[in-house]
Image: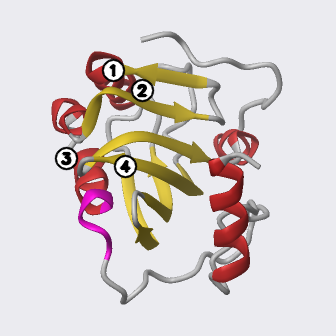
Amino acid sequence: MSTLRTLTALVALTVPGLSLALPYPTGSTLPVATSRPVPPIVQQWADAWNKADAAGMARLFTEDGVYQDFAFQAKNTGKDGIAGWVTLTLKSIPDAHAVLLDAFQIGDRAAVQWVFSGTPVGFGDLGGKSFSVPVSSVFELRDGKIEQVIDYYNRADLFHQLGLPSDNWAAPKP
């Protein structure tokens, strides 16, 4: 079993109430934020999103770091690629925001459950509609930096909230 699958299975089995491997159905109530300490690298990552700081995000990664977003079939490698992905996201969703719900770190692995929200621009007339979707992210760390982070969320749920069709869509390239 791959490291990622092992970690996801471990998380799903050992953290009651934290369903990192399972999507939330539309209309579900999200859990409240945890009172447990958040791993510093996860907090810095969320802060970079919330400060719209693409360069700051890139600095959190190793030189060969990878940021992967499964919902949008995007995989960005290296500090320039990661900064480009964050810049593209923020250009499309200027008010992008991350709210951490729960997170933990075990050795060189971390996982976080969070809510991604924002109001997209430049996609035609969405009438100012916003979205708020639960996301689970799994981090692989090396020497105190992010080697890889993978975001898991339901793109169809995001599109549904915006009133958009959700089939056969791919993200633009940075």
Q: Which of the two labelled residues, at mark 1 and mark 4, occupies the earlier sequence position? A: 1
Q: Position of residue 63 (x, y in %)?
A: 26, 25
Decide if residue 112 is on the left or right side of residue 90.
Answer: right
Q: Which of marks 1 and 4 is in front?
A: 4
Q: Which of the two labelled residues, at mark 2 and mark 4, occupies the earlier sequence position? A: 2
Residue that numbered label 4 is attached to: 141
The answer to whether marks 2 and 3 mark residues whose Cβ atoms lie closer than 8 Å is no
Residue that numbered label 1 is attached to: 78
Disc 4 on helix, strand or loop?
strand
User: Vertical placement of 123 versus 25: above or below?
Assistant: above
| Of 81 and 62, the residue lying toward us | 62
Q: Which of the two labelled residues, at mark 3 and mark 1, occupies the earlier sequence position? A: 3
Residue 140 in sight from this viewpoint: yes
Disc 3 on helix, strand or loop?
loop
Q: Residue at x 23, y 46 (%)?
A: 48
Q: Distance between the residues labelled 2 and 1?
A: 21 Å
Q: Residue at x 38, y 56 (%)?
A: 98
Q: Nearer the viewer, mark 3 or mark 1?
A: 1
What colour-coding does the image apply? secondary structure
| Of 11 and 171, the residue lying toward us | 11
Q: Position of residue 148 (x, y in %)?
A: 44, 39
Quadrant containing the C terminus is: top left
The answer to whether marks 1 and 4 mark residues whose Cβ atoms lie closer than 8 Å is no
| Of 93 and 48, the residue lying toward us | 48
The disc labelled 2 sits on which kind of residue? Answer: Ser
Residue that numbered label 2 is attached to: 92
Q: Distance between the residues labelled 2 and 3?
A: 15 Å
Could you say which quadrant of the image residue 59 lies in?
top left
Magenta range: 38-42
